[in-house]
Image (spheres, grey):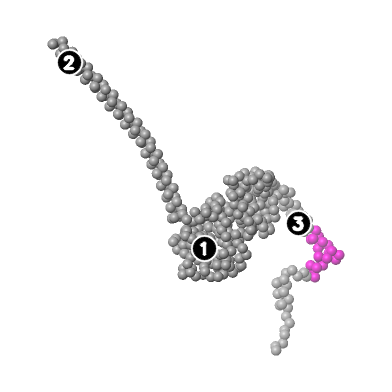
Amino acid sequence: MPPRLRCAVPRGLGSAINPSRTTSRSAVLLLPSAPAPAAVSATRQYATAAVASTGSSFRLPADYIPPTKPPTARPSDTRKSQLLRTYTSLLRSTPLILIFQHNNLTAVEWAAVRRELRLALGKISSDGTESAEVASRAELQVIRTRIFDVALKIVEFHDPSKVAPTETSALSGNRIKVVHNHDLSKAAYKAVKAATKGDEPLPESSSYAQISPLLVGPLAIFTLPAVSPAHLATALSILSPSPPAFPAPTRKKSPGYHDPIAQSGFQKLMLVGGRIEDKVFDLEGVKWVGGIDGGLDALRAQLVYMLQSAGLGLTTALEGASKSLWLTMESRRSVLEEEQNGGKEGAKEDAKEGEKTESS
């Protein structure tokens, strides 16, 4: 074994790596009871004065509010608050949401359900890039029922454009007006409380009043980034099959769907309703949307045809009225002309007969 050599290099490296080590001179300066030289004490006093002057020049106003941390009605750094913001963003940006009740699905069952749903939607995505994007962004997730209920209230009853600005101090000390209308603000909290307080029921036209009876028990939602009847029909045939409109896939086409674990997961899911284009649909309404032949393009074509046929019928009715009026007037004119012509001819005949009688 070679002899161990002592050198001063490791000590230098250690002080460079760990600069938090204090030398003996720094330790003496930090100790309040240790006597300090005059030069050192003067230096410390100068540094303290500089720090004090610097701090006084950058003192923040008493009512200054950082733009990155606006005031909130509830703690913004908790998990519930972040879930609430996630749900409100989801409700505002997702046009199609299906609501399912689930009954104690295990992690393996959830994995099997999502696998079969992803495979079924992937078969539609081969039609084009738009279908592929819709299928890739489809998601089935478990939600917190109470927080989702509050998110629905905020989305419907809180209007950020109607929140009045508040006056506060800027970093420079000037008075500015700032609007705090985010989902965790006091304005959103007051709007929800004002809309739901009291014993009076909400109006039937309210979306929350229609969907709130469905928000019972453990829930899961299936979301699509666009209203696509083809993707909706495929999802219904997987998650909630109902033949003959939405039959389950056969064992030959999808053997994994008939796996015992997957079947156990599908049996624990129950479709209770949906929210499509800010409108609440029950089970039959969701099936009607999924059963539109040709998708939204065919529905738009039918709407255009109805408008064109209605316009054509109106034009025909107006033209028919004018034509009937013209025919009536023409027939009356011909009758009057015949009467006038008949009167003149009768007078001539009477004059001729009178002349004959006089001559005789």
The picture quadrant where one finds residue 273 is: bottom right
Per the image, the residue denoted by label 1 is 238
Q: Residue visible at 20% across and 16% down? A: 350
Q: Earlier in the sequence, mark 2 or mark 3?
A: 3
Secondary structure of the magenta portion, mostly? helix
Magenta-highlighted residues: 24-45
Q: Residue visible at 48% across and 60% down? A: 243
Residues at marks 1 and 2, CA–CA distance in whole angstroms: 101 Å
Near-viewer residue (247 or 82): 247
If the image is split into quadrants, where does the N terminus sit?
Answer: bottom right
Q: Residues within 10 Å of mark 2 (few under 14, many from 20)?
A: few
Is residue 211 left or right of 49 when viewed as pictured? left
Per the image, the residue denoted by label 2 is 352
Q: Earlier in the sequence, mark 1 or mark 2?
A: 1
Q: Is residue 278 magenta?
A: no
Q: Name the element at disc 1.
A: helix
Per the image, the residue denoted by label 3 is 51
Near-viewer residue (285 or 5): 285
Q: Residues within 10 Å of mark 1 (few under 14, many from 20)?
A: many
Residue 240 seen: yes
Q: Residue visible at 57% across and 66% down? A: 265
Q: Earlier in the sequence, mark 3 or mark 1?
A: 3
If the image is split into quadrants, where does the C terminus sit?
Answer: top left
Q: Nearer the viewer, mark 2 or mark 3?
A: 2
Circles 2 and 3, Cβ within 8 Å, touching? The answer is no
